[in-house]
Amino acid sequence: MMGKIAFWMACAVAMVLTGCFGGPDREVKYYMLPVPKVKKATADPVFPYTLMVTHASVDPAYRRNNIVYRESPYDFMFYTYSVWAARPEFLVEQSVTSMMKSSALFGVLDVDVAVKPDLEFMTHVNAVEEVDRGNDRFARLAVTFTLRKTETEGFIWRKAYDESRNYKGDDMRNFAEAVYELLKAFADDAIDDIRRVMSFVPEEHVTAKGYEELPAPEMEEPAASDVPATEAPAAPEVEPPAVSE
C-alpha cells in the first residue's frame, strides 16, 4: 500500500515539474521589419541641406512588444507568443531612416551625431495592429510624418497615413510583411511629396543662418561738437502787483 502511494506522489511531482498537464511551454516568436540597404549615392543630394531622422514616437496603447489585434473598435488585445523583436516605433524608425538615406533628397545624419542638422524628419506611430473581420485578417498601420526646421514649433510639411492591407495565412510573418509594405508605400509617397514641396521653399527659410535673429545695427554716438547746444527758455518776466496806499 505504501509503495502505491509513493508511486502516485512521484507521478504528481513529475507532472508539476513538466508544466502540470499542459506539456512543454509554447515557443515565443519574434518579428522584425526589414531595414532596406541604403543605395549608394551617385551624386550630391537634391537639396543642399542636412536632415536627421529623429527617434520615432508611438501612442501609449502600442508602446509594447506584443503584437496587438482587434476584433472590433471596442476590443484591444495582444498576442502572448507573437511579439515584435523591439518596440514597433524603433522598428519603424530604422526602416524610415534607411529609406530617407536612399532617397538622396538631403544629406542624412545619424541620430547620434553631435551636429545640428538643418531639418528634422519626425515619425509618430498612431497604430500598428492586426484587425480581424470575420475570416479575413488585415494589417493596419497609421503613422504621421513631419518635416520641420530643427528646433522650431512649426513645420514645413506634414502628412498622416492610415491604411489596412489584407493578408493570407496564420503565420504572423505575413502580418509583418503587410505592415512593411504599408510603411514603404507611405514613405515613398512622403519622399515624392517632400521633393515637390521643397522645390518651392526659399533657402533662407531652411538653413540655420536664415532662422538666426539678426543683430541690431550699431548706432554711432555723435561727436560732442556735432551736438547742437540747447538753451533753456528764459522765464517770463512778471511785474509785481501794484500796492495801493
Image: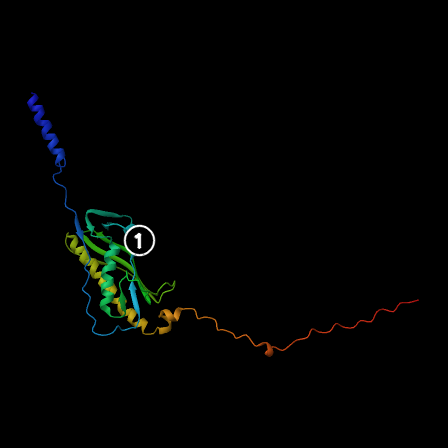
Q: Where's residue 156, x and y in %?
A: 35, 67
- Left or right placement of residue 163 versus residue 16 in this view: right
Q: What residue did someone put label 1 on?
A: 59
User: Who's the residue at 21% across and 58% down the image?
Assistant: 179
- The quadrant of the image that shows the N terminus is top left
Color theme of the render: rainbow
Residue extending farthest to the bottom is 226
Residue drawn at x 24%, y 69% as measured from the top left = 103
| Residue shown at the point (37%, 73%) measured from the top left | 204
Residue 6 versus residue 71 in the image, above or below:
above
Looking at the rendered structure, the kind of residue marked 1 is Asp
Residue at the spot x=27%, y=58% of the render?
Answer: 142
Asked if residue 42 lies left or right of residue 154, the reply is: left
Residue 208 drawn at (x, y percent): 36, 69
Neighbour class for label 1 at 10 Å: few (<14), some, many (≥20)? few
Residue 230: x percent and y percent?
66, 75
Give the tally of numbered discs: 1
Among all residues in the image, which is located at the extreme right? 245
